């Protein structure tokens, strides 16, 4: 096996796995408003057209390099402040006030954009091949959600993802009264799922009581997307908590993240109150586990030199990350596949259910 410290993608601040990354909250971008965005080392302008659609373009006008975020949104297009050149959502120059022809103007790079969970997501890479990260157990269901506070950590997203499959630390840091055994399942090139298979041992009054709420193994399931986003399912048989942690790398090698709390939608006033209470409880569960790990994320310098058998889930995750297509920090103008127009990027994606069909082992 290749050395776990000799990685081409994992924990590399100069590499970005092709995939969906959250950019900003939807509420931060009103209709007719444009904003600058440094997205994974590349300067963009994002704006919401009068039709409500969000557009992301490379930031600088190809005429003289003015930043388009200083311009004005007109309909679903944006007009540069400097000379009033107008650009469509696909990045094509649609109008130059002082002349008729615009054919000579290079097209601006247009980025695939989606909105989900109250966030604006941008695809880093060529045409999107996967859906927005989601909780597999809730696929196809209408869900209610609540956003936690965004946060910044000093370590890379890949390292933060490892924490949730580090079975040893659940005993040493969180004092969980069960030994976890996380079995991996590779779903596709960008998604891997880990499921716990162990029961709560009846070794004390507390564990015997907790065991009454689980028919089989202690429920703990994680699904990882692009090495930087993960969904967690935890809780007894009658009440499951669902959390998505969406992370993106920073130029300094750290992470910027956003927690998303999910619960199945319930109709009516009572259903709304129940969902609100469960989302608050899910936030509390998330805060409990995050609190114990805060100091580790502040000071860790990840260097995996002495793996043991208990680290096998981590090894599987690193190997999965290493196989995923990656781009250099700053996202180059050209990739192995031509960048799509925004209109092309709006073509239907594979459904969440189809994305969860396990790939055939080779």
Image: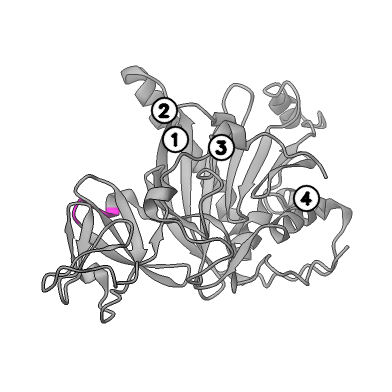
**Viewer-closest of 344 and 50:** 344
Give the residue at mark 2: 275
Residue 130 sits in which quadrant? Answer: top right
Give the residue at mark 4: 313
Q: Is residue 15 left or right of residue 57?
A: right
Q: Is residue 31 within the magenta segment?
A: yes
Q: Taking 239 as reference, is 90 above or below it?
A: below
- Which SS class for mark 4? helix
Q: How many marks?
A: 4
- Which SS class for mark 2? helix
The answer to whether the residues at label 2 and label 3 have Cβ atoms under 8 Å apart is no
Residue 314, given in percent of the width and then of the height, sits at 76, 55
Q: CA distance from mark 1 to mark 3?
A: 15 Å
Q: CA distance from mark 4 to mark 3?
A: 19 Å
Asked whether the viewer can see residue 155, the reply is no
Residue 272 sits in which quadrant? Answer: top left
Which of discs 4 and 1 lies nearer the camera? The answer is: 4
**Viewer-closest of 273 and 303:** 303
The answer to whether the residues at label 4 and label 2 have Cβ atoms under 8 Å apart is no
Q: Taking 4 as reference, is 75 above or below it?
A: above
Give the residue at mark 1: 279
Q: Taking 84 as reference, is 113 above or below it?
A: above
Q: Residues within 10 Å of mark 3 (few under 14, many from 20)?
A: some
Residue at the spot 49% in from the left edge and 26% down from the top edge: 141
Q: CA distance from mark 2 to mark 3?
A: 17 Å
Residues shaded magenta: 28-32
Asked whether the viewer can see residue 248, the reply is yes
Which of discs 2 and 3 lies nearer the camera? The answer is: 3
Q: Earlier in the sequence, mark 4 or mark 3?
A: 3
Give the residue at mark 3: 135
Q: CA distance from mark 4 to mark 2?
A: 33 Å
């Amino acid at each position: 096996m290749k050395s776990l410290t000799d990685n081409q993608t994992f924990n590399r601040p100069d590499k970005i796995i092709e995939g969906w990354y959250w950019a900003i909250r939807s509420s931060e971008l009103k209709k007719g408003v444009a904003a600058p965005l440094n997205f994974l080392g590349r300067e963009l302008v994002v704006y919401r057209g009068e039709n409500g659609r969000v557009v992301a373009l490379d930031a600088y006008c190809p005429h003289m390099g003015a930043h388009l975020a200083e311009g004005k949104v007109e309909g679903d297009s944006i007009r540069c402040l400097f000379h009033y050149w107008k650009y469509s959502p696909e990045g094509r120059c649609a109008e130059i006030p002082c002349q008729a022809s615009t054919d000579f103007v290079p097209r601006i790079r247009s980025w695939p954009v989606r909105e989900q969970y109250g966030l604006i997501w941008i695809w880093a890479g060529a045409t999107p091949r996967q859906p927005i990260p989601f909780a597999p157990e809730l696929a196809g269901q209408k869900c209610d959600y609540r956003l936690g506070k965004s946060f910044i950590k000093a370590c890379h997203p890949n390292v933060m993802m490892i924490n949730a499959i580090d079975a040893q630390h659940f005993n040493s840091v969180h004092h969980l009264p069960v030994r976890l055994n996380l079995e991996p399942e590779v779903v596709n090139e960008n998604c891997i799922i880990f499921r716990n298979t162990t029961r709560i041992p009846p070794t004390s009054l507390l564990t015997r009581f907790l065991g009454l709420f689980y028919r089989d193994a202690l429920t703990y399931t994680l699904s990882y997307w692009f090495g930087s986003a993960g969904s967690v399912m935890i809780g007894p048989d009658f009440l499951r908590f669902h959390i998505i942690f969406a992370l993106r790398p920073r130029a300094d090698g750290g992470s910027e993240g956003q927690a998303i709390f999910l619960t199945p939608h319930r109709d009516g006033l009572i259903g709304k109150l129940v969902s609100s209470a469960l989302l608050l409880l899910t936030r509390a569960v998330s805060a409990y586990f995050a609190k114990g790990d805060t100091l580790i994320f502040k000071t860790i310098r990840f260097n995996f030199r002495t793996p043991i058998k208990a680290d096998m889930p981590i090894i599987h995750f690193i190997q999965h990350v290493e196989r995923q297509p990656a781009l250099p920090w700053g996202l180059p103008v050209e990739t192995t596949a031509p960048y799509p127009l925004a209109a092309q990027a709006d073509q239907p994606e594979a459904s969440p259910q189809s994305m969860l069909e396990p790939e055939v082992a080779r």
